[in-house]
Image: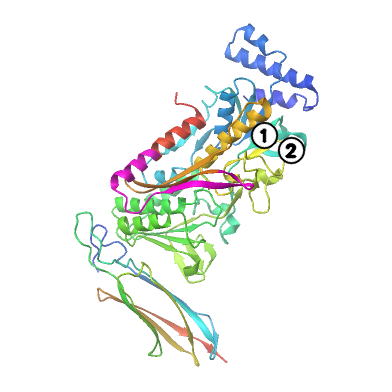
Amino acid sequence: MIDRARRRTTAPLDEGCPNSRRRRSLLKGFAGALAAGTPASAVIATIGRARPQVVVLGGGAGGATVARQLAREADGRLDVTLIEPKQRYTSCFYSNLYLGGYRDWSSITHAYDDIARDAPLERIPRRALAVEPDRRRVILEAGVSLHYDRLVVAPGIDILHEGIPGYAARHEHRAPHAWRGGEQLRTFKRQLERLRDGSTVVIVAPPDPSRCPPGPYERASLIARLFQRRRHRRSRVVILDTKSSFAKQSLFMAAWERYYPGAIEWYPPEVHGGILRLDVKRGEVYTDLDVFRGELLNPIPPQSAAAIAFASGLADESGFCPVEAGNMRSSKARDVYVLGDAAIAGDMPKSAFAANSQARVVAQAIRHDLLDDAIPDAVYANTCWSLLADDDAVKVGARYGPRAGTIRTIESFLSKPGEPAAVRRATYRQSVDWYTSITREMFGPPA
Amino acid sequence: MVARAGRRAIGAVNPRARVRLPDQVRRGETFVVRTLISHRMESGLHRDASGERIPRDIVTRFVCRFEGDTVFAVDLDTAIAANPYFEFHMRATRSGRLAFEWTETTGRVTRLERWLEVGA
């Protein structure tokens, strides 16, 4: 794979010259065919074909879906490349279930090894540094650059540590935010399991817009459940919120009263008066009202689109990337699509489900753009499940469509308070099935 | 208080009280006092997993006194949400001791005191 990436670097970048493109396709055709042991006749068939190049930045719920979908649906008419430096992906979605002991590490970790097995795409395991939309190329680390005809930018979020005074990246080991999947989850889980009865975990919940809006509250629920399972009687979770209300609030609060009475305290800014600073070493959060102490701090800072969106001029002053409502095309750069958590998607929350849904719309739009395929009007969807306790899950979701220049809710649904246990159990099963299906869509079926 | 198993005991063991006053106020100036107590406020209307009624366990009265004189008092009942937060305004013409007191159905009383510094 690295070899192929290198070959691309040395290939001329002048996309104005059809010959150079044809030559590259030819080289790629040979390389691919020889590697796969394809008969020579198949190689000859690719000669003279200049397939449009689609490059996807980021192998998360949005990027991996769009890359695989395009590769499979374009039927060999597109050249799809996925840029993703990591070898493995540990999903941020479902990570609360890992923390709460419902899932093990391996069940939320997925290797990229098989991503191209049933989808003809190339994965380049390098970091992308910037996009040059005027020249239609992506700069990768080590001076590699890559031409594209259409680019999909799905880089996810960056954590703005400075949004919580006193918190910095160097504190992540002691006070992990654990809001981007990966290793920090393991650190956080180890810390949770070390806590003795009578401990307090203080969660600082982020302002909107943020990834997985109900996430901090599901996390609080499942930490309380973990305490219960470990026979803690006095341990608590304190949520210091930067918002006055939160997603599925009434459902969460009813569950807290029912399952974890007194074990979860939620304080909005109207009560704590504002979060002033964090003292990670002492385990203290200073608010205007008072100091809140915890044996463990889980500060979840404000977020923005990942750095590459800024380096490439795709983000606006909101910190995220404006897009066209009908197809997620960047409002800032031609031939570029932005999707997932990095995009400003109107009424849609930042969730894996939303990114996956946007990816389908983008895949269609690109096929229409480059291949003239007929496509239906854009319809987006989202569902966010939250687990409240064993076999008790709730959901919120909607269908969305482009309206007056932005993505608006068409119809929505929300679990009701006091639903029968069977309904909640079915909701939980549905969420488990969804996890299986989205990760298959992202990484391919298991070997 | 002895902690019991299950949902009854959680949070009932260690209610915590917090008070916020201005560092200094001027004589006669109106200022805000903010108070919070962490308390589950169990209404007594719930039943536990075995169908048994969970006993009522709430804060029933909150009082703030300045040098012994009541400046703010409230009686709380079952409909009050967990973690009661009160914010009220007061004036003082001299420095003195502010005493805060939360009384629970269990008979337990949580007390906090703060010195109020009144400048010219």
Residue A391 pos. (x, y %): 32, 44
Circle on res. A151: 1
Tag 1 secondary structure: strand
Identify the residue at image location x=33%, y=41%: A426
Identify the residue at image location x=28%, y=67%: B43
Give neighbour class at mark 2: few <14, some 14-19, many 20+ (Cα, 10 Å): some
Tag 2 secondary structure: helix
Residue A329, by quadrant, is top right
Is residue A445 positioned above or below A308 on the image? above
Q: Who comes first in sequence, dot 1 or dot 2?
A: 2
Residue A211 pos. (x, y %): 53, 48
Q: Chain of mark 2?
A: A
Disc 1/disc 2 C-alpha distance (Å): 9 Å
Residue B61, by quadrant, is bottom left
One can see residue B51 in this view? yes
Q: Chain of mark 1?
A: A
Q: Pointer 2: what residue?
A: A133
Residues in magenta, as a range = A401-430
**Left or right position of A405 against B41:** right
Is residue A400 positioned above or below A231 on the image? above
Question: Depth check: A101 or A138 in front?
Answer: A138
Circle on res. A7: none
Question: Depth check: A27 or A282 in front?
Answer: A27
Identify the residue at image location x=65%, y=11%: A43
Give neighbour class at mark 1: few <14, some 14-19, many 20+ (Cα, 10 Å): many
Q: Are marks 1 and 2 on the same chain?
A: yes
Q: Are marks 1 and 2 in contact (CB under 8 Å)?
A: yes
Count of residue discs: 2
Quadrant containing the N terminus of chain A is top right
Question: Depth check: A216 or B108 in front?
Answer: A216
One can see residue A182 in this view? no
